[in-house]
Amino acid sequence: MVYVSSRSSRWYALSLLVPILVLSQSILTTAQKHCQDPIVRKEWRTLSKSARLNYLDAVHCLLSTPPLTPLSAAPGIRSRYDDFVATHINQTLSIHFVGHFLPWHRWFTAVYETALREECSYEGAQPYWDWTLDTPADEFMESPVFDDRYGFGGNGALVPIDESDPNEVLGRTGGGCIEGGPFKDLVVRLGPLNGLGDNPRCLTRDLAPYYAARFLGRNQTELTLRQKDFGWFDRVLQGGQTFDASGIHDGGHYGVGGTYGVMADPFASPADPIFWMHHANVDRLWWSWQKQDLWERLWDISGPIFMQDYGNEKGGNTTLDYKLSLWSNAKDIVVSDVMDIQGGGLCYDYDELYESDRDMENSEDESQEMGFDW
Ligand SMILES: [Cu+2]
Protein backbone atom coordinates (compact mmCIF):
# COMPACT_ATOMS: atom_id res chain seq x y z
CA MET A 1 0.00 0.00 0.00
CA VAL A 2 1.23 3.45 -0.82
CA TYR A 3 1.55 5.52 2.28
CA VAL A 4 0.94 9.20 1.84
CA SER A 5 0.20 11.34 4.81
CA SER A 6 -1.12 14.58 3.39
CA ARG A 7 -4.79 14.28 2.78
CA SER A 8 -5.51 11.26 4.91
CA SER A 9 -4.10 12.95 8.00
CA ARG A 10 -7.21 15.09 8.12
CA TRP A 11 -9.36 12.03 8.30
CA TYR A 12 -7.51 10.01 10.84
CA ALA A 13 -6.51 12.69 13.32
CA LEU A 14 -9.90 13.12 14.87
CA SER A 15 -11.27 9.66 14.45
CA LEU A 16 -11.77 9.03 18.14
CA LEU A 17 -13.57 12.26 18.81
CA VAL A 18 -16.71 11.82 16.77
CA PRO A 19 -19.65 11.71 19.15
CA ILE A 20 -22.08 8.85 18.99
CA LEU A 21 -25.53 10.28 18.94
CA VAL A 22 -28.68 8.41 18.20
CA LEU A 23 -32.07 9.94 17.71
CA SER A 24 -35.01 7.80 16.88
CA GLN A 25 -37.25 10.47 15.42
CA SER A 26 -38.42 9.67 11.97
CA ILE A 27 -39.78 12.43 9.81
CA LEU A 28 -39.59 11.13 6.30
CA THR A 29 -43.08 10.09 5.42
CA THR A 30 -42.86 9.79 1.67
CA ALA A 31 -40.95 6.55 1.38
CA GLN A 32 -42.85 4.57 -1.16
CA LYS A 33 -42.86 0.97 -2.08
CA HIS A 34 -43.87 1.78 -5.61
CA CYS A 35 -42.72 4.80 -7.53
CA GLN A 36 -45.34 5.90 -10.00
CA ASP A 37 -44.48 9.46 -10.93
CA PRO A 38 -40.79 10.17 -10.33
CA ILE A 39 -39.58 13.75 -10.11
CA VAL A 40 -36.90 14.44 -12.70
CA ARG A 41 -33.50 15.82 -11.80
CA LYS A 42 -32.04 18.14 -14.43
CA GLU A 43 -28.75 19.82 -15.15
CA TRP A 44 -28.46 23.30 -13.63
CA ARG A 45 -27.93 25.19 -16.88
CA THR A 46 -30.92 23.57 -18.54
CA LEU A 47 -33.31 24.92 -15.91
CA SER A 48 -35.12 28.16 -16.66
CA LYS A 49 -33.83 31.17 -14.77
CA SER A 50 -36.95 31.23 -12.65
CA ALA A 51 -36.53 27.53 -11.82
CA ARG A 52 -32.95 28.21 -10.74
CA LEU A 53 -34.11 31.06 -8.51
CA ASN A 54 -36.86 28.88 -7.04
CA TYR A 55 -34.30 26.30 -6.07
CA LEU A 56 -31.97 28.87 -4.50
CA ASP A 57 -34.94 30.35 -2.59
CA ALA A 58 -35.79 26.92 -1.22
CA VAL A 59 -32.22 26.50 0.04
CA HIS A 60 -32.50 29.86 1.79
CA CYS A 61 -35.77 28.68 3.29
CA LEU A 62 -34.10 25.61 4.82
CA LEU A 63 -31.34 27.90 6.09
CA SER A 64 -33.94 29.91 8.00
CA THR A 65 -36.15 27.06 9.20
CA PRO A 66 -35.62 25.93 12.82
CA PRO A 67 -33.67 22.69 13.30
CA LEU A 68 -34.99 19.33 14.44
CA THR A 69 -31.78 18.20 16.12
CA PRO A 70 -31.68 19.20 19.80
CA LEU A 71 -28.99 21.71 20.69
CA SER A 72 -27.72 19.30 23.32
CA ALA A 73 -26.64 17.02 20.48
CA ALA A 74 -24.99 19.70 18.33
CA PRO A 75 -24.81 23.14 19.98
CA GLY A 76 -23.94 24.97 16.75
CA ILE A 77 -27.09 23.97 14.88
CA ARG A 78 -29.33 26.91 14.00
CA SER A 79 -31.38 25.69 11.03
CA ARG A 80 -32.90 22.75 9.23
CA TYR A 81 -30.04 23.10 6.80
CA ASP A 82 -27.62 22.62 9.69
CA ASP A 83 -29.36 19.35 10.57
CA PHE A 84 -27.90 17.96 7.36
CA VAL A 85 -24.44 19.44 7.89
CA ALA A 86 -24.32 18.04 11.43
CA THR A 87 -25.45 14.62 10.22
CA HIS A 88 -22.60 14.50 7.73
CA ILE A 89 -20.06 15.72 10.29
CA ASN A 90 -21.26 13.16 12.77
CA GLN A 91 -20.83 10.27 10.36
CA THR A 92 -17.93 11.36 8.17
CA LEU A 93 -15.56 8.67 9.37
CA SER A 94 -18.05 5.89 8.75
CA ILE A 95 -19.47 6.91 5.33
CA HIS A 96 -16.40 7.59 3.16
CA PHE A 97 -14.00 5.07 1.62
CA VAL A 98 -16.51 2.38 2.54
CA GLY A 99 -18.83 0.20 0.47
CA HIS A 100 -21.93 2.14 1.52
CA PHE A 101 -20.47 5.53 0.51
CA LEU A 102 -22.70 5.79 -2.57
CA PRO A 103 -25.89 4.38 -0.96
CA TRP A 104 -25.52 6.68 2.06
CA HIS A 105 -25.00 9.80 -0.07
CA ARG A 106 -27.86 8.81 -2.38
CA TRP A 107 -30.17 8.63 0.60
CA PHE A 108 -28.73 11.84 2.13
CA THR A 109 -29.33 13.80 -1.08
CA ALA A 110 -32.84 12.40 -1.55
CA VAL A 111 -33.85 13.31 2.01
CA TYR A 112 -32.47 16.82 1.52
CA GLU A 113 -34.47 17.07 -1.71
CA THR A 114 -37.58 15.93 0.18
CA ALA A 115 -37.00 18.58 2.86
CA LEU A 116 -36.79 21.29 0.18
CA ARG A 117 -40.05 20.08 -1.30
CA GLU A 118 -42.07 19.31 1.80
CA GLU A 119 -40.80 21.97 4.18
CA CYS A 120 -39.98 24.78 1.76
CA SER A 121 -42.65 24.40 -0.94
CA TYR A 122 -40.09 23.70 -3.64
CA GLU A 123 -41.78 22.04 -6.58
CA GLY A 124 -38.81 20.84 -8.57
CA ALA A 125 -36.27 18.07 -8.12
CA GLN A 126 -32.71 18.41 -6.86
CA PRO A 127 -30.69 19.74 -9.82
CA TYR A 128 -27.31 18.28 -10.70
CA TRP A 129 -24.06 19.80 -11.89
CA ASP A 130 -22.57 17.97 -14.87
CA TRP A 131 -19.01 19.17 -14.43
CA THR A 132 -17.88 17.49 -17.65
CA LEU A 133 -19.60 20.42 -19.38
CA ASP A 134 -17.23 22.82 -17.58
CA THR A 135 -13.95 21.32 -18.70
CA PRO A 136 -11.24 21.92 -19.94
CA ALA A 137 -9.67 24.00 -17.21
CA ASP A 138 -10.00 27.35 -18.88
CA GLU A 139 -13.78 26.94 -18.89
CA PHE A 140 -14.19 25.78 -15.33
CA MET A 141 -14.53 29.13 -13.61
CA GLU A 142 -17.07 30.28 -16.17
CA SER A 143 -19.50 27.52 -15.19
CA PRO A 144 -23.12 28.71 -14.90
CA VAL A 145 -23.11 27.00 -11.52
CA PHE A 146 -20.81 29.76 -10.21
CA ASP A 147 -22.96 32.58 -11.54
CA ASP A 148 -23.64 35.34 -9.02
CA ARG A 149 -27.23 35.81 -10.04
CA TYR A 150 -28.45 32.47 -11.37
CA GLY A 151 -25.99 30.22 -9.61
CA PHE A 152 -24.24 29.60 -6.32
CA GLY A 153 -21.71 32.41 -6.60
CA GLY A 154 -18.07 31.86 -7.40
CA ASN A 155 -14.61 31.96 -5.97
CA GLY A 156 -13.23 33.39 -2.74
CA ALA A 157 -10.53 36.04 -2.63
CA LEU A 158 -7.00 34.68 -2.99
CA VAL A 159 -5.45 33.61 0.29
CA PRO A 160 -1.75 32.70 -0.04
CA ILE A 161 -0.88 29.13 0.85
CA ASP A 162 0.44 28.51 4.32
CA GLU A 163 3.77 26.78 3.58
CA SER A 164 3.18 24.30 6.36
CA ASP A 165 -0.16 23.18 4.95
CA PRO A 166 0.19 19.64 3.58
CA ASN A 167 -3.04 19.91 1.60
CA GLU A 168 -2.06 22.27 -1.18
CA VAL A 169 -4.19 21.69 -4.24
CA LEU A 170 -2.10 22.69 -7.24
CA GLY A 171 -3.43 25.63 -9.18
CA ARG A 172 -5.79 26.79 -6.45
CA THR A 173 -7.04 30.32 -7.04
CA GLY A 174 -8.97 31.51 -3.97
CA GLY A 175 -9.47 30.42 -0.39
CA GLY A 176 -11.24 33.40 1.14
CA CYS A 177 -14.90 34.29 1.61
CA ILE A 178 -16.96 34.10 -1.57
CA GLU A 179 -17.37 37.54 -3.04
CA GLY A 180 -20.80 37.39 -4.60
CA GLY A 181 -23.93 35.36 -5.22
CA PRO A 182 -26.88 34.30 -3.11
CA PHE A 183 -24.71 32.76 -0.37
CA LYS A 184 -22.34 35.68 0.05
CA ASP A 185 -23.74 36.39 3.52
CA LEU A 186 -24.24 32.78 4.52
CA VAL A 187 -23.00 32.08 8.03
CA VAL A 188 -21.34 28.68 8.27
CA ARG A 189 -21.50 27.57 11.90
CA LEU A 190 -20.62 23.90 12.11
CA GLY A 191 -17.12 22.55 11.62
CA PRO A 192 -14.39 22.97 10.69
CA LEU A 193 -13.74 19.25 10.71
CA ASN A 194 -15.81 17.52 13.36
CA GLY A 195 -16.74 20.57 15.44
CA LEU A 196 -20.44 20.62 16.29
CA GLY A 197 -20.28 23.87 18.29
CA ASP A 198 -21.21 27.35 17.06
CA ASN A 199 -18.27 28.66 15.05
CA PRO A 200 -19.69 31.42 12.81
CA ARG A 201 -17.69 32.23 9.67
CA CYS A 202 -18.16 32.94 5.99
CA LEU A 203 -18.50 30.48 3.13
CA THR A 204 -15.09 30.01 1.52
CA ARG A 205 -14.16 28.61 -1.91
CA ASP A 206 -10.81 27.96 -3.47
CA LEU A 207 -11.47 26.98 -7.08
CA ALA A 208 -8.78 24.81 -8.65
CA PRO A 209 -9.49 24.66 -12.40
CA TYR A 210 -6.67 22.35 -13.50
CA TYR A 211 -7.29 19.86 -10.74
CA ALA A 212 -11.02 20.00 -11.52
CA ALA A 213 -10.49 19.46 -15.23
CA ARG A 214 -8.26 16.49 -14.58
CA PHE A 215 -10.67 14.67 -12.32
CA LEU A 216 -14.07 15.90 -13.50
CA GLY A 217 -13.59 15.66 -17.23
CA ARG A 218 -14.96 13.22 -19.72
CA ASN A 219 -11.92 10.93 -19.53
CA GLN A 220 -12.32 10.37 -15.81
CA THR A 221 -16.04 9.83 -16.27
CA GLU A 222 -15.36 7.22 -18.94
CA LEU A 223 -12.77 5.49 -16.82
CA THR A 224 -15.20 5.27 -13.93
CA LEU A 225 -18.09 4.06 -16.04
CA ARG A 226 -15.99 1.31 -17.58
CA GLN A 227 -15.45 -0.56 -14.31
CA LYS A 228 -17.00 -4.01 -14.39
CA ASP A 229 -18.22 -4.42 -10.84
CA PHE A 230 -19.40 -2.20 -8.04
CA GLY A 231 -16.24 -2.68 -6.01
CA TRP A 232 -14.01 -1.21 -8.72
CA PHE A 233 -16.54 1.38 -9.80
CA ASP A 234 -16.73 2.65 -6.23
CA ARG A 235 -12.96 2.68 -5.68
CA VAL A 236 -12.22 4.51 -8.90
CA LEU A 237 -14.98 7.00 -8.10
CA GLN A 238 -13.76 7.63 -4.55
CA GLY A 239 -10.11 7.64 -5.53
CA GLY A 240 -6.97 6.86 -3.59
CA GLN A 241 -5.19 8.64 -0.79
CA THR A 242 -3.27 11.32 -2.64
CA PHE A 243 -4.43 14.22 -4.76
CA ASP A 244 -2.77 12.53 -7.73
CA ALA A 245 -4.91 9.43 -7.22
CA SER A 246 -8.15 11.37 -6.88
CA GLY A 247 -11.43 10.19 -8.32
CA ILE A 248 -14.50 12.08 -9.41
CA HIS A 249 -15.79 12.48 -5.87
CA ASP A 250 -12.61 14.29 -4.85
CA GLY A 251 -12.68 16.19 -8.12
CA GLY A 252 -15.78 18.09 -7.05
CA HIS A 253 -14.76 18.57 -3.45
CA TYR A 254 -11.22 19.83 -4.08
CA GLY A 255 -11.97 21.39 -7.47
CA VAL A 256 -14.36 23.76 -5.68
CA GLY A 257 -12.86 23.68 -2.19
CA GLY A 258 -9.18 23.69 -3.09
CA THR A 259 -7.18 23.91 0.10
CA TYR A 260 -9.17 26.41 2.16
CA GLY A 261 -12.72 26.15 0.86
CA VAL A 262 -15.60 24.60 2.78
CA MET A 263 -16.06 21.93 0.09
CA ALA A 264 -12.58 20.64 0.93
CA ASP A 265 -13.60 19.92 4.52
CA PRO A 266 -14.34 16.16 4.64
CA PHE A 267 -16.69 16.72 7.57
CA ALA A 268 -18.48 20.05 7.04
CA SER A 269 -18.55 20.17 3.22
CA PRO A 270 -22.38 20.10 2.98
CA ALA A 271 -22.28 23.61 4.50
CA ASP A 272 -21.55 24.78 0.93
CA PRO A 273 -24.88 24.45 -0.93
CA ILE A 274 -22.97 23.39 -4.04
CA PHE A 275 -22.33 20.06 -2.25
CA TRP A 276 -25.77 18.80 -3.27
CA MET A 277 -25.21 19.69 -6.93
CA HIS A 278 -21.99 17.69 -6.96
CA HIS A 279 -23.43 14.73 -5.11
CA ALA A 280 -26.51 14.63 -7.32
CA ASN A 281 -24.17 14.21 -10.27
CA VAL A 282 -22.08 11.59 -8.48
CA ASP A 283 -25.36 9.76 -7.91
CA ARG A 284 -26.28 10.23 -11.55
CA LEU A 285 -22.97 8.65 -12.51
CA TRP A 286 -23.73 5.65 -10.29
CA TRP A 287 -27.21 5.34 -11.79
CA SER A 288 -25.71 5.64 -15.29
CA TRP A 289 -23.37 2.78 -14.41
CA GLN A 290 -26.20 0.74 -12.89
CA LYS A 291 -28.35 1.22 -15.99
CA GLN A 292 -25.67 -0.29 -18.23
CA ASP A 293 -26.60 -3.65 -16.73
CA LEU A 294 -29.48 -2.89 -14.43
CA TRP A 295 -30.59 -6.39 -13.62
CA GLU A 296 -27.16 -7.24 -12.23
CA ARG A 297 -26.29 -3.88 -10.77
CA LEU A 298 -29.42 -3.29 -8.71
CA TRP A 299 -27.93 -5.87 -6.37
CA ASP A 300 -24.22 -5.28 -6.78
CA ILE A 301 -22.73 -3.87 -3.59
CA SER A 302 -19.36 -4.46 -1.96
CA GLY A 303 -16.54 -2.60 -0.28
CA PRO A 304 -15.49 -2.37 3.35
CA ILE A 305 -17.65 -1.48 6.32
CA PHE A 306 -14.69 0.34 7.88
CA MET A 307 -12.89 3.23 6.20
CA GLN A 308 -10.26 2.12 3.66
CA ASP A 309 -10.36 -1.40 5.02
CA TYR A 310 -10.12 -2.87 1.53
CA GLY A 311 -8.28 -5.89 2.90
CA ASN A 312 -11.04 -6.53 5.45
CA GLU A 313 -8.63 -6.48 8.36
CA LYS A 314 -11.04 -4.62 10.64
CA GLY A 315 -14.32 -6.06 9.46
CA GLY A 316 -16.39 -7.32 6.57
CA ASN A 317 -17.98 -5.82 3.52
CA THR A 318 -21.12 -3.77 3.12
CA THR A 319 -24.11 -5.90 2.14
CA LEU A 320 -27.64 -5.13 0.96
CA ASP A 321 -28.97 -5.33 4.51
CA TYR A 322 -26.40 -2.92 5.92
CA LYS A 323 -28.17 -0.20 7.93
CA LEU A 324 -27.98 3.48 6.95
CA SER A 325 -28.85 6.26 9.36
CA LEU A 326 -29.44 9.97 8.78
CA TRP A 327 -29.81 10.91 12.42
CA SER A 328 -32.82 13.16 12.97
CA ASN A 329 -33.48 13.68 9.28
CA ALA A 330 -35.09 10.39 8.36
CA LYS A 331 -35.88 6.90 9.47
CA ASP A 332 -33.15 4.28 9.31
CA ILE A 333 -33.10 2.20 6.14
CA VAL A 334 -30.90 -0.47 4.62
CA VAL A 335 -28.73 -0.38 1.51
CA SER A 336 -31.24 -2.37 -0.57
CA ASP A 337 -33.79 0.44 -0.06
CA VAL A 338 -31.69 2.81 -2.15
CA MET A 339 -30.25 0.57 -4.86
CA ASP A 340 -33.12 1.55 -7.17
CA ILE A 341 -33.91 5.26 -7.56
CA GLN A 342 -37.46 4.28 -8.44
CA GLY A 343 -38.25 1.77 -5.75
CA GLY A 344 -37.85 1.15 -2.05
CA GLY A 345 -37.58 4.56 -0.44
CA LEU A 346 -36.85 6.57 -3.58
CA CYS A 347 -38.80 8.04 -6.47
CA TYR A 348 -36.82 10.23 -8.84
CA ASP A 349 -35.21 10.05 -12.24
CA TYR A 350 -32.57 11.86 -14.31
CA ASP A 351 -33.40 13.63 -17.55
CA GLU A 352 -30.25 12.24 -19.15
CA LEU A 353 -27.58 9.71 -18.21
CA TYR A 354 -23.93 9.26 -19.09
CA GLU A 355 -23.29 6.72 -21.74
CA SER A 356 -20.03 4.88 -22.03
CA ASP A 357 -19.07 4.86 -25.67
CA ARG A 358 -16.03 2.66 -25.33
CA ASP A 359 -16.01 -1.01 -24.65
CA MET A 360 -15.63 -2.19 -21.11
CA GLU A 361 -12.41 -4.16 -21.44
CA ASN A 362 -9.28 -3.79 -19.35
CA SER A 363 -10.80 -1.86 -16.50
CA GLU A 364 -8.43 -3.28 -13.94
CA ASP A 365 -5.36 -2.43 -15.99
CA GLU A 366 -6.59 1.12 -16.28
CA SER A 367 -7.19 1.34 -12.57
CA GLN A 368 -3.57 0.50 -12.00
CA GLU A 369 -2.54 3.10 -14.53
CA MET A 370 -4.35 5.65 -12.43
CA GLY A 371 -1.94 5.05 -9.58
CA PHE A 372 -3.99 2.68 -7.47
CA ASP A 373 -1.91 0.31 -5.43
CA TRP A 374 -3.79 -1.11 -2.47
CU1 LIG B 1 -19.77 12.89 2.22
Image (tube, helix red, strand yellow):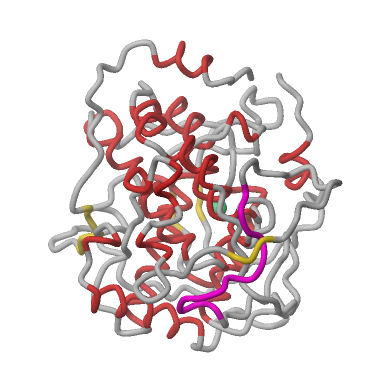
Q: Quadrant of residue 268?
A: bottom right
Q: Residue furthest right?
A: 164
Residue 231, position as x, y percentages in the image:
46, 27
Figure check: 204 above or below 180: above
* Residue that appears at 24% across and 72% down: 124
At horizontal 33% and vertical 57% (from top left) the residue drawn is 128
Task: Tell me, yes or no, if residue 90 can be seen here.
Answer: no
In this rendering, does residue 92 appear at all?
yes
User: Residue 202 occupies which quadrant of the picture?
Assistant: bottom right
In the image, is residue 52 above or below residue 340?
Answer: below
Magenta residues span 172-184
Q: Is residue 288 above or below residue 189?
A: above
Q: Is residue 101 above or below residue 158?
A: above
Q: Is residue 164 left or right of residue 62?
A: right
Q: Is residue 351 one of those drawn in magenta?
A: no
Which x, y percent locates residue 50? 24, 79
